[in-house]
Image (cartoon, rainbow, N blue to C red):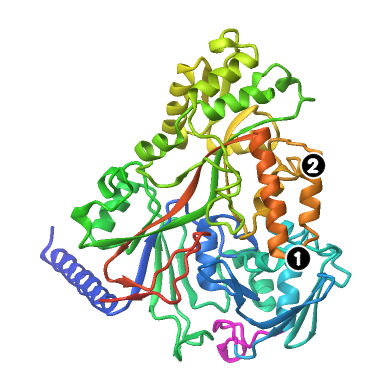
């Protein structure tokens, strides 16, 4: 090897070293919030913000008419105020005049233009446009879905109107979803399908680069319109998101301080971070802190209740006595303590989760562990000690195998034999949606903070695959209460309808509530201003980072 060649290698190495250390030095002066998203991000187009990974990223880039605070109360955003007609059908929004899209070369002189009402007319009509095929189109089911008719209308630059076909009290909170973000027509139409990786919004952070599967980088929006105490938001200089799927590696990066927070808890390190009582391991008390509160997520086991199906006619779970026996037959408190380190609230109440305003732990009593009652119900059903009771197959994905094996073991002790069938997550979802499984593990995370979102799963007109009623539950009294609730704008009265519906679900047992989930965030000590909320929405505009 020649000396000249060695010298070139030396120079290249020196250049690389200087470049890296220079970047590192420059970056060390920036307040960058770093987190990992193991699920990956499929799109930065808010029309496709259907999962948590996409919702979190879009929440940093975009804004809508309204937003939720940490108590899940609807608050102004780009709409500074609004009115709702007395019949509950006409929503009129009055927009701020100081909101601008992020700077982009496609705008005149590269400067982001002001947001006007016609931008919302375009953005929301796009959601229901069948050629776009947004998975969020369902949120406007109560809006006239004929694109040629008056459904979303800009009356002028600052006034925007939405007309509903029928009353829907939860509609305002639904408008806080990322699907309803405002986007610039000229940018979207320029990029077409590639807008998913070239987003332009109005949010606290603007898009810089995205190496799919590797890293997404956002930078502070210097023209962001929201302030706190007269100080412009956000406080951070940027956000960096990595996509490492190796959770042990992610955990080590967190321990080294290279990641600023961890969301939820992974089985691989739950015993390292948490005690059995759900508290932070004392050895990390000086390094991290924990944010936690109820999460609007109900984890459950569901039964297919469609008696017309050939596959359900032979399954014993068609009998309510058997469903109740299963509900009584395992200890949910012990399951949460030892398998989840006390993260989550045992499912001892109805389907509406803790954290929802209409959650009722007093009158909506569910099923606490009672093996003697379970055995009594088996006798009433004609299967004393489970004799003659056919084996029941429970279909799950491997994430919940430990919980379901625990349930299997406890039910076996009282004579109920459970066979566990493990499927890939996508396969399981498809089979549940198409009513091909008699007994399955499911979960429901709130799309918006109203219990209607949960109770709609059991309304008979919402049968899957087009609707979310995966159990095919049908009850005339339940349907009547559901329909009454959707015409009631008084929250207190509506909540009473919700509670009555929840009690019907407890009595009929189309599902077994396992637990109500819990928001759990581990944060580095130099991070402040990061809050949590029952929707587990990541909001970084008020976060500060000491460097």
Q: In the rendering, which numbered label is found on residue 162?
A: none
Q: Residues within 10 Å of mark 1 (few under 14, many from 20)?
A: some
User: Where does residue 16 sit, x and y in percent of width and height?
Assistant: 23, 69
Name the main secondary structure of what is drawn in magenta: loop
Direction left: furthest residue:
3
Q: Which residue is mark 2?
A: 477
The magenta stretch spans residue 180? no
**Residue at the spot 54% in from the left edge and 56% down from the top edge:** 42
Q: Earlier in the sequence, mark 1 or mark 2?
A: 2
**Residue at the spot 56% in from the left edge and 66% down from the top edge:** 72
Does residue 429 lie above or below 313 as drawn? below
Question: In front: 516, or 212?
Answer: 516
Does residue 402 lie above or below 61 as drawn? above
Q: Residues within 10 Å of mark 2 (few under 14, many from 20)?
A: few
Q: How many marks?
A: 2
At mark 1, the secondary structure is loop
Q: Does any portion of residue 64 appear in the rendered image?
A: no
From the viewer's perspective, tell me whether residue 127 is left or right of residue 366.
right
Direction top: furthest residue:
388
The magenta stretch spans residue 107? yes
Query: Magenta residues?
Result: 99-116
Q: Which residue is mark 1?
A: 489
**Residue at the spot 58% in from the left edge and 76% down from the top edge:** 201
Picture quadrant of residue 378: top right
Q: CA distance from mark 1 to mark 2?
A: 20 Å
Picture quadrant of residue 309: top right
Does residue 230 lie above or below 280 as drawn? below
- Picture quarter with the C terminus: bottom left
Direction front: furthest residue:
362
Picture quadrant of residue 181: bottom right
């Amino acid at each position: 090897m020649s000396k000249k060649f060695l010298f070139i290698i030396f120079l290249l190495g020196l250049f690389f070293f200087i470049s890296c250390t220079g970047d590192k030095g420059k970056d060390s002066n920036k307040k960058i919030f770093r987190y990992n998203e193991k699920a990956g991000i499929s799109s930065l187009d808010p029309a496709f913000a259907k999962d948590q990974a996409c919702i979190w990223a879009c929440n940093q880039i975009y804004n809508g008419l309204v937003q939720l605070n940490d108590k899940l109360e609807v608050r102004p955003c780009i709409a500074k105020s609004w009115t709702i007609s007395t019949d509950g059908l006409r929503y009129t929004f009055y927009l701020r005049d100081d909101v601008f899209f992020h700077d982009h070369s496609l705008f005149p002189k590269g400067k982001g233009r002001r947001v006007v009402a016609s931008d919302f007319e375009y953005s929301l009509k796009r959601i229901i446009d069948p050629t776009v095929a947004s998975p969020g189109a369902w949120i406007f089911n109560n809006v006239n879905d004929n694109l040629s008719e008056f459904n979303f209308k800009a009356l002028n630059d600052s006034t925007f109107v939405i007309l509903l076909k029928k009353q829907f009290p939860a509609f305002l909170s639904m408008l806080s979803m990322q699907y309803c973000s405002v986007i610039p027509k000229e940018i979207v139409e320029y990029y077409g399908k590639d807008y998913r990786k070239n987003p332009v919004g109005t949010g606290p952070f603007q898009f810089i680069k995205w190496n799919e599967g590797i890293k997404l980088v956002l930078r502070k929006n210097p023209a962001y319109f929201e302030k706190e105490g007269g100080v412009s938001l956000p406080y951070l200089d940027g956000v960096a998101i990595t996509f490492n799927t190796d959770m042990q590696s992610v955990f080590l990066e967190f321990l080294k301080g290279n990641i600023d927070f961890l969301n939820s808890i992974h089985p691989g390190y739950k015993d390292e971070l948490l005690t059995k009582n759900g508290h932070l391991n004392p050895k990390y008390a000086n390094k991290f802190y924990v944010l936690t509160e109820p999460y609007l997520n109900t984890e459950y086991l569901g039964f297919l209740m469609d008696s017309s199906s050939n596959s359900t006619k032979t399954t014993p779970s068609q009998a309510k006595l058997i469903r109740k026996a299963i509900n009584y037959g395992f200890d949910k408190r012990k399951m949460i303590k030892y398998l989840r380190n006390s993260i989550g609230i045992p499912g001892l109440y109805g389907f509406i989760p803790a954290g929802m305003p209409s959650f009722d732990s007093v009158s909506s009593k569910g099923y606490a562990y009672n093996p003697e009652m379970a055995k009594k119900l088996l006798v009433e059903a004609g299967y004393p000690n489970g004799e003659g009771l056919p084996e029941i197959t429970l279909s799950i994905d491997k994430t919940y195998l430990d919980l379901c094996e625990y349930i299997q073991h406890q039910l076996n002790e009282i004579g109920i034999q459970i066979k566990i069938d493990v499927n890939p997550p996508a396969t399981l979802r498809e089979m549940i949606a198409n009513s091909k499984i008699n007994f399955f593990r499911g979960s429901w995370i709130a799309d918006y903070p109203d219990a209607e979102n949960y109770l709609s799963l059991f309304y008979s007109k919402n049968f899957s695959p087009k609707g979310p009623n995966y159990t095919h539950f049908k009850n005339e009294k339940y349907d009547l209460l559901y329909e009454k609730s959707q015409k009631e704008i008084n929250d207190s009265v509506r909540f009473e309808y919700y509670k009555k519906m929840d009690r019907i679900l407890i009595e009929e047992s189309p599902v077994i509530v396992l637990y109500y989930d819990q928001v759990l965030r581990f944060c580095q000590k130099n991070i402040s201003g990061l809050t949590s909320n029952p929707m587990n929405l990541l909001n970084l505009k008020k976060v500060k980072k000491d460097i």
